[in-house]
Image (tube, rainbow, N blue to C red):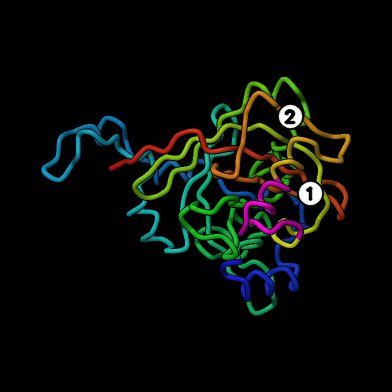
Amino acid sequence: MKKGVKAIALILGAVFLISAGFIIANLTPEKKDFDDYKNDPAESSKPSLISRPEYPINKIDFKKLKSENEDIIGWIEIPDTVIDYPILYSDTDKDGKDYYIDRDMYKKKKSAGSIFVQTVNFSNFSDRNTVIYGHNMLNGTMFGTLKKYRDRKHFDEHDEIRVYIPGRMLTYKVYSAFVYTDNHLFSDFDFGNDKGYQEFIDMTYNPKSSVKHINKDVKVTTEDRIITLSTCTAKDEERYLVVAVLQNEVYTQ
């Protein structure tokens, strides 16, 4: 499997554990801080000599974002929720933890951490399964509202996830949400081959947990790419996962 050495190091180091889930609310980022990194629709619609009118303007100003931190690889948005954050690319630090598990996008120490992807995945969302981590904050910020997917109405009404990366907008459809163990998914499943990936897909349609919602009308095959949002629960040995399959990929300016 690609990046095998790094994957083993991540797994053995347990850097993937989002164990500080219930964190005091005043350590979360201010949402208004992130608005500065979004393109103004009115300004971005103006013609330019270098623009490509057949491509829409990317909602996120990645040039400005990356001037702050090159580790920012994307932006995640779930419409009509507070989930609207930059995504960081997190390697391990000297203590064997994910770097952005307790740092904000400016690399400042903050218990709320950031939304991040580990380096066991590629940074361009080209993997079969890209796992995105975030803390379960008491005040609902970061991935604190993922728990709402335990409600069937919320699950059905918030099934679209948008991920913006430089030059593209990716739209995913949520089809599964459930409680899983705290095992690293890359240790439980071999996504490098069809058999391992199919085993994971089958599990997402029929997880062992009694806490689950599935939309079986959404069909996923080994030809598809998915994302898995992962956050902690009140129990150290559990993680709550929301899984979505790529439905549309649009190139952007």
Please state, as top left, top right, bottom left or bottom right, where the C terminus lies in the image. Answer: top left
Q: Nearer the viewer, residue 109 or 10?
A: 10
Query: Does residue 134 appear left or right of residue 36 in this picture?
Result: right
Q: Quadrant of the N terminus?
A: bottom right
Q: Residue at x 74, y 73 (%)?
A: 13
Provide residue 167's location: percent of width, then percent of height. Answer: 34, 47
Q: Name the residue beneath numbered marker 1.
A: 239
Residue type beneath disc 1: Arg
Q: Which residues are magenta?
A: 188-200
Q: Amino acid at mark 2?
A: Ile
For the residue carrying disc 1, how many other residues have a C-alpha within 10 Å: few (<14), some (14-19), or many (20+)? many
Residue 163 vs 119, above or below: the answer is above
Decide: is 247 above or below 233.
Answer: above
Is residue 112 inside the magenta stretch?
no
Q: Nearer the viewer, residue 6 or 232?
A: 6
Query: Counting residues from the N terminus, which is met first, the one under dot 1 or under dot 2?
Result: 2
x then y, percent, for residue 226: 58, 43
Judging by the rendered image, the residue that carries numbered circle 2 is 214
Q: Secondary structure at mark 2?
A: strand
Is residue 190 inside the magenta stretch? yes
x and y percent of residue 100 in the render?
60, 62
